[in-house]
Amino acid sequence: MSDHHSLHALANVLVVLFVVSNILAVGMTLTVREIVAPLRDRLLVMKALVANFVLVPLLAYVLVQVTHLERGLAIGLILVATAAGDAFMLKLSEIAKASMAFTLGLLVLLNVASVIYMPIVVPLLLRGVTVDPISIAKSLVLLMLIPLVVGLCVRATFEKIARMLAGPLDRMSSVLIAVAGSLILFLDFDQILATWGSHAILCTLILAPASFAFGYFMVSSPPKIRSALGLGTGQRNGTAALVIAVRNFPANYSVVVMIVIFIGIGSLVILTTLAVFCRRANVPEVAARRL
């Protein structure tokens, strides 16, 4: 039992290290100009915020109420739904050939907004659950906002060093989350299987594509912006959700289990949805070329 607890503690430490290294790497790849330029369109920014911080959390709350999701799983789903700005959206946007400039700006916007938004909204959506908003804010500021600012400062001051460190940090973060995810899967495989009849997977299969659709259909054009916003909204910030879970709900590991389920299955759903939308978007272009 002691070994099991120690391994859980190790998994939590690995998650924290992943978060810091991942956010540092992102910060070291950005410049302030790259962040600010695509965010000058105020209407577009407002639509992005509405999609991420109104529509997605609202749907998650409805799903929790309708499915009567077990308390720990419900907390995990709410945390994922209220957290936006996952760094993986950069890779997805690259695959989709979406606007990388807008994606970069959106990533920082959603991360900063999540730091402000989650401590206020999470306690409201989790009535009956003891949640310390100050603790949530501290977790996000210490492990996400500060590393992001440090990364940006290093890039602005020592560009060569930033370029040299960004790649290794990104690879290290990938290894850390792979090890942490494998460890969590090993330790909690029985709990993950036990969620089969709890609607956890059903909620994921509904929320993930719906989140993508909220962002994608929030704007009409151009297609590269639509794709970027769809991916930015669909790919929820599992990093931020895990930070809050391991630091605020250490005794309820089903919270982490729900987040892991959403990250795993949700990412696959987003990739599938992305493939479908990209195929449809390319049909008129292909037809035009044939004509």
Image (cartoon, rainbow, N blue to C red):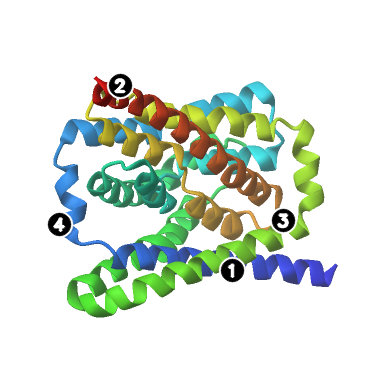
For residue 14, which numbered disc appears in the image?
Answer: 1
11 or 143, nearer to the observer:
11
Q: Which residue is mark 3?
A: 185
The residue where tag 2 is placed is: 287
Label 1 element class: helix
Q: Quadrant of residue 29?
A: bottom left
| Dot placed on the residue nearer the N-terminal end, 4 or 3 | 4
Which residue shows up at 59% across the image and 42% down it? 262
State if disc 2 and disc 4 touch (CB < 8 Å): no
For the residues bearing labels 4 and 1, Cβ distance under 8 angstroms: no
Residue depicted at x 25% and y 26%:
289
Type of the residue with mark 2: Ala
Element under label 4? helix
Q: Position of residue 193 (x, y in %)?
A: 79, 43
Q: Residues within 10 Å of mark 4 (few under 14, many from 20)?
A: few
Assign the C terminus to one quadrant of the image.
top left
- The residue nearer to you, when weighing 100 against 132, is 100
Q: Is 253 or 48 nearer to us in this picture?
A: 48
Tag 3 near tag 1, CB within 8 Å? no
Compare marks 4 and 2 and give the one earlier in the sequence: 4
Label 1 environment density (alpha carbons within 10 Å; few <14, some 14–19, many ≥20): many
